[in-house]
Amino acid sequence: METESNKVVSFKSLTDSVGRFNLTNKTCLIPQMNRIGVHLLAATFKGFGIHAKVMDTYKGLDLGMEYTSGKECYPCQITTGDILYFMEKEKERLGEDFNPENYVYFMPEADGPCRFGMYNKYQRIVLDSFPQLDRVKIGALTTKDGYSLDGIIEEERVRDLRKTAYFSVVVADILDRLLWRIRPYEKEPGMTDDFIERSMNAMEHTFEKHGPNKDFDKILDRLEEIVQEGKAIIDPDIPPKPLIGIVGEIYLRTHVQANQDVIRVLERYGAEVVNASIAEWVNYTTYDRLREARIGFRMDLKQLRLGRLKEHLKEIISFGGELLYQELRQKQVYKRVKSLIDLKKDHRVAHLESILKEDDLYSFDAGTEACLSISGIVEYAREGYNGVVNIYPFTCMPSTTTSAIAKPLMNKLGTPYLDTPYDSSFQPGREAAIRTFMYQAHQHFKRHGRKGD
């Protein structure tokens, strides 16, 4: 009887302590994925009165591995270690003043077959196994509603926060692309890394100050100043290099420690790299909800389900307006920046879906990041990139699917392709594989040159 009671309490924790919580007077703990992106997001939250903190990452990997079985995908191990390490250090720092109820750990989720949707449930069970940590709430935004922020602050400010948060994602993408555009051509080693770190700090201050008023013009003015400064780092005497596109699982391809700084390794062997953006994923989640609403509307119309018809029509208007806003904002930022420097443009999700439909390569009905990766690979090849790298956690199902489809496809397209699955180990043949891939990319570059736009 006692055992059954404990089980009920445990399952109740998955609903009562995982979800969307008001962040007023709480510390919102944000795990680091894309370094620039999470820092600008945290700064945006701070501007709206939320005490947001980006946690140190990778320092608690041993803890993450201790409290996982090894069957979970790699990002689950890393983020589990990050929250446990942070809480351990907070206890040491605060002593008797430590109050776990002051924290909300931010761990979004996705629906569908990807295991990412189970991270916060599993981490809830892990936290519940520690004294006091069962009182740490897990804030879980979900792709089911396009990562709605309803409920985390006052209702009248939610829409402004969402718009500014999205804008911070796009600006963070620009800073990342600026890094990858400049670093292979920098006048002196290390100049770009120092510049980008200073630029990130400057944009944090800018978003915290101007974000709450949605003063995006002032944010863009500051971004333009940063771009102009960055251009001066480029050595014009260094000739163009092979252009490499990156796709894959969103956490691994953006988390530098997890992917063993693969972009820098590619650069060491003569590449200029462009990684898929974070905004692309955000746009995809909105686009997919709009797509599902349209499918539901057509089914309701055929079956004359008038009640559901009205509900789906509201969703079409809501998600359609959201996607239009996101794409217009993204276009606005890229247009201003591209007038100053030739950064690579981003992909429209509707265009990526049309690529899959052309040769029936895959379907958005199946979902996951494979939708973006497979179509992104084809688009990179068509745009004249000299090679494509697929980065993902070892055993990741969507990325393994991508690999199975992409390998024969890239042979047909005549573009070099490389799979780079990662876990916590250092594979001895990894660098040799990258060197071989880059040799092929250099040969492709000699034969075809590069376009990239």
Image (cartoon, grey):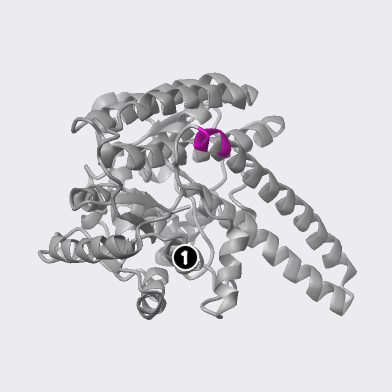
Q: From the image, tell me which residue sits under label 1.
A: 382
**Toward the viewer: 324 or 235?**
235
Q: Is residue 7 visible?
A: yes
**Toward the viewer: 118 or 220?**
220
Q: Which residues are magenta?
A: 335-339
**Toward the viewer: 395 or 12?**
395
Classify residue 7 as left or right of residue 334: left
| Furthest residue in direction left, as rendered | 428
Image location of residue 105, percent across then percent down: 43, 42
Above or below for 362 versus 165: below
Image location of residue 355, percent across then percent down: 56, 70
Mark 1 residue crowding within 10 angstroms, few (<14) / some (14–19) / many (20+): some
Q: Secondary structure at mark 1?
A: helix
Q: Quadrant of residue 431?
A: bottom left
Classify residue 131 as left or right of residue 102: left
Q: Residue placed at 46% from the left, 60% from the top?
A: 383
Above or below for 74 versus 200: below
- Magenta: main secondary structure: helix
Is residue 151 located in the magenta-colored stretch of the structure? no
Circle count: 1
Q: Residue placed at 18% from the left, 48% from the top?
A: 268
Image location of residue 410, percent across then percent down: 37, 74
Q: Residue placed at 54% from the left, 69% from the top?
A: 367
Q: Residue placed at 40% from the left, 31% from the top?
A: 53
Q: Quadrant of residue 27?
A: top left
Q: Amino acid at mark 1?
A: Arg
Classify residue 263 as left or right of residue 159: left
Classify residue 212 as left or right of residue 279: right
Image location of residue 85, percent across then percent down: 26, 41
Quarter the N terminus occupies: bottom left
Q: Is residue 104 visible?
A: no
**Toward the viewer: 262 or 414?**
414
